[in-house]
Image (spheres, helix red, strand yellow):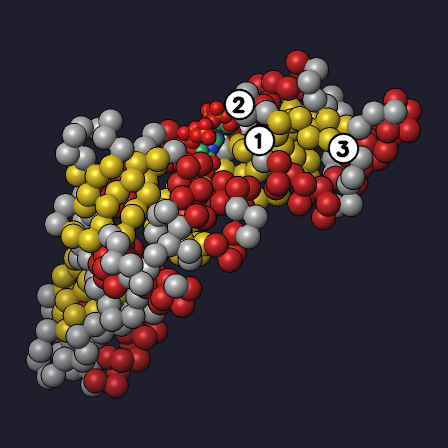
Amino acid sequence: MSDAPLVLAVPSKGRLQENATAFFGRAGLKFVQSRGSRDYRGTIAGLDGAEVAFLSASEIVAQLASGAAHLGITGEDLVREQVADADAAVELLTPLGFGNANVVVAVPQAWIDVRTMADLDDVASHMRARQGRKLRVATKYVNLTRRFFAEHGLADYRIVESLGATEGAPAAGSAEIIVDITTTGATLSANALKILDDGVMLSSEANLVASVRAPWGERAKAAASAILSRIAAEEEARSIREIRARPAGLAPAAIDELVAGFGARLPFGGAGEGDVLTIHCPDKAVFALVEQLSRSGADEITVGAPAYVFRKANPLIERLLKRI
Ligand SMILES: Nc1ncnc2c1ncn2[C@@H]1O[C@H](COP(=O)(O)OP(=O)(O)OP(=O)(O)O)[C@@H](O)[C@H]1O
Ligand SMILES: O=P(O)(O)OC[C@H]1O[C@H](OP(=O)(O)OP(=O)(O)O)[C@H](O)[C@@H]1O
Ligand SMILES: [Mg+2]
């Protein structure tokens, strides 16, 4: 097995780039581009065994599918569109909470009685019977469209490939309907288009994606573990608050019950009589737990927000190791 360094592919431009860089920055993974920002290769400060490739969202998918990159950040829509055997070729390790968009079937607003894929099938059949031609669908999501239309038993259509400004195709007369990605819906409504009631084929967001086919030698695995443990530690820290208190007059069993009742945990175990207790509590339960501790006799209670919480179990690493 090769001892190649891990290749981490991150978006070099566009709407995903900023969020992706910030995401890794929060996890303590700072990218270094020694020859300036137009240098499409880089490293991660302080982390040997890893290289960074700065690519477009689409190219990241291609490199993950081929194994040229081990880990990457890109949109699920592109993974599902570009990789026929996506579930075999890659593992979506975790959604990242940004780059949200839906891939949708949109038709002219003027088609007032066309609300579902079944209505669209009727339109397609009528067009075929009356005009002897197929319904034209403008899209850059050819595979997603074919799969979705097949699932809905819609065959009387043909795809008109469109690589940008797809929403303009019906008004320009180059297609009747479209399949495209949308976030706010502004571009669709600006082009007098509406989404079918059952026309959302995929709710996509940016994901941290691992390549099954990449050369996972010891060096790449070690770098992946370092990266994924920092990512998991930052995610865990973001979801909790750290409460410190000296719970006077509570027996250990009562403390365990109290903590568990709020979905909290004792990362360093229980405290002896009079010792300070450390509790990691879900953000939304903090004040309720503080009031309970206060009622049980705790004098001083502090609440903090740790930057990282490193735990032995790391679901991201476990998911990766199961696939490579
Ligand atoms: N409203 C949106 N429109 C397009 N992409 C979006 C939107 N919201 C989130 N995304 C995500 O961003 C990805 C495209 O990102 P971006 O626009 O940065 O790529 P790009 O650099 O424009 O490349 P391309 O021209 O191939 O889209 C989409 O595949 C999707 O995952
Ligand atoms: O629902 P909305 O918020 O209106 O966003 C959807 C639009 O944004 C994207 O275009 P982009 O600006 O990325 O240009 P592109 O299509 O060339 O990538 C996408 O292709 C849609 O046209
Ligand atoms: Mg774009």
Q: Residue at x 24, y 27 (%)?
A: 38
Q: As displayed, is residue 55 above or below residue 254? A: above
Does residue 309 appear left or right of residue 140 in this picture?
A: left
Spatial separation of the CA atoms under disc 3 and disc 2:
20 Å
- The answer to whether the residues at label 1 and label 3 have Cβ atoms under 8 Å apart is no
Looking at marks 1 and 2 on the same chain, the residue that comes earlier in the sequence is marked by 1
Where is residue 14? Give x, y as percent.
37, 29
- The answer to whether the residues at label 1 and label 2 have Cβ atoms under 8 Å apart is yes
Q: Residue at x 34, y 50 (%)?
A: 71
Q: Cβ of disc 1 within 8 Å of ligand 1?
A: yes
Q: Residue at x 17, y 38 (%)?
A: 32
Q: Which residue is mark 1?
A: 140
Where is residue 253? Give x, y as percent.
25, 86
User: Farthest residue in the left direction?
Assistant: 274
* Neighbours of disc 2 within 10 Å: few (<14), some (14-19), many (20+): few
Helix, strand or loop status at disc 1 = loop
Q: Which residue is mark 3?
A: 157
Looking at marks 1 and 3 on the same chain, the residue that comes earlier in the sequence is marked by 1
Looking at marks 3 and 2 on the same chain, the residue that comes earlier in the sequence is marked by 3
Quadrant of picture, ligand 1: top left
Residue 67 visible in this rendered orientation of the protein: yes
Q: Cβ of disc 2 within 8 Å of ligand 2?
A: yes
Disc 3 marks which amino acid? Answer: Tyr
Pick the front one: 10 or 231: 10
Q: Which mark is residue 93?
A: none
Q: Which residue is mark 2?
A: 164
* Neighbours of disc 1 within 10 Å: few (<14), some (14-19), many (20+): many
